[in-house]
Structures are given as C-alpha cells and as structure tokens.
Amino acid sequence: MFSRCAVVVLGLLLAACATRGPAVVAVSPAFEAPYTLDAGDRLRVVVFGQPGLTNSYSVDASGKIAMPLIGLVDARGSTVAELQKDIQARLRQGYMREPNVAVEVETYRPFFILGEVVQSGQYPYVANLTVETAVAIAGGFSPRAVKTSATISRNIEGQVVTATVPSTYPVRPGDTINIQERWF
C-alpha cells in the first residue's frame, strides 16, 4: 500500500515538473498599436523639389528632429505618416504652397535582450525580427532557458507595457526581451 502511494506521489511530482514554463497570455490590443518613432531612429525625409531640405535626420534624446526652415519637429510618439503630415503642415506655413514630403525610417533603434541567453545586451534591429531570431542573434538559449515563450516590454504612449508572448512573436525596435529561467 505504501509503495503504491509513493508511486502516485512520485508520478504527481514528475507531472508538476513537466510544465512548459509560464503560460502565454493573450496580448492586449494596446500592445499591437502601430510602430511609433522615438530616440535612436534615423529618418530619411524627402521634400520633393527641395534638395536643401531633403536629408537624413536622427531623432534626438528629446524626441525631436531639427530641420532647416521649420526648426525642431517633435517625432517621439508619432507614426511615420503623422510625422510626414506634420512636416507638410509646417512647410505650408509661409515656406511652400504645396509641399510634397515623404518620410521613411532609414535605421531603427536597437532592441535589448536579457535573461537566459548566451550573450544578453543591445543589438541592432533587423527587419522581420521575432523572439526566436533575437535569441539567435544573442548567441542562443542558455541551458536553463524557457524556450517556448518570453516577456517583452514595450513603450506605448509613454507607458511601459509588458506581455508574455510565444517565441514566434514579432519584435519591434526598442523592445526589451526577457528570456525566463525554467525550474526543471
């Protein structure tokens, strides 16, 4: 009788150890908001017919870009389309009749990866980055890493929002990825 109870208890303990790590929760719609610009992004602004205004501009630590004629333009928290409209509106105020402006991101700000990876740190963002590829860039998982999910912290409208996501989830510039440690 004692040996049966011991086998049942041992079986329950092994089943408890076989969990796959933290459960992946549904990501809130706010986490899926469109990409917004912030410090560290490098932009290519083209003002058609105006070579003196067409240039590459970096978003500085205060979240602004400095353009000739119109001065400092607030880029932090804006989408590329919103910034483009803002520049057009400013140029219309006494500088040009119908400015035609195009804005694109030339270089994105870096992402960060922490926790159970071979080499945590800051890395340059590349297109179509997922948690899995970010881990590969950081040298792979450590032996004690949870490999099925990660925690991502993302700045949305001035607030840091955190979510647990699967390893196939897309990463954005400026995200901080944390790979958790598994217990067994």
Image (cartoon, rainbow, N blue to C red):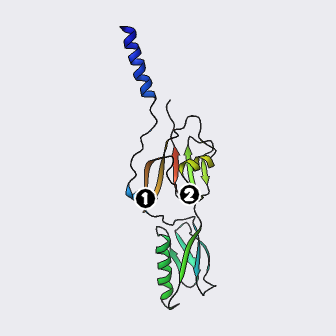
Residue 52 in the image, given as x and y percentages of width and height: 63, 85
**Position of 4 compared to 175: left or right?**
left
Quadrant (top left, top right, bottom left, bottom right) of the N terminus: top left
Residue 117 image offset from top left, x and y in percent: 59, 42
Task: Tell me if residue 112 comes above or below residue 20 in the rendering.
Answer: below
Question: Who's the residue at 42% across and 56% down the image?
Answer: 31
Write the residue at 52% across / 90% down: 96
Name the residue that disc number 1 marks. Answer: 32
Amino acid type, callout 1 = Glu
Query: On the image, numbered disc 2 is attached to which residue?
Result: 128
- Image location (x, y in percent) of residue 5: 37, 13
Which of these two is toward me, 131 or 175? 131
Q: Residues within 10 Å of mark 1 (few under 14, many from 20)?
A: few
| 69, 109: nearer the viewer | 109
In the depicted structure, whether residue 119 falls above or below residue 105:
above
Residue type beneath disc 2: Asn
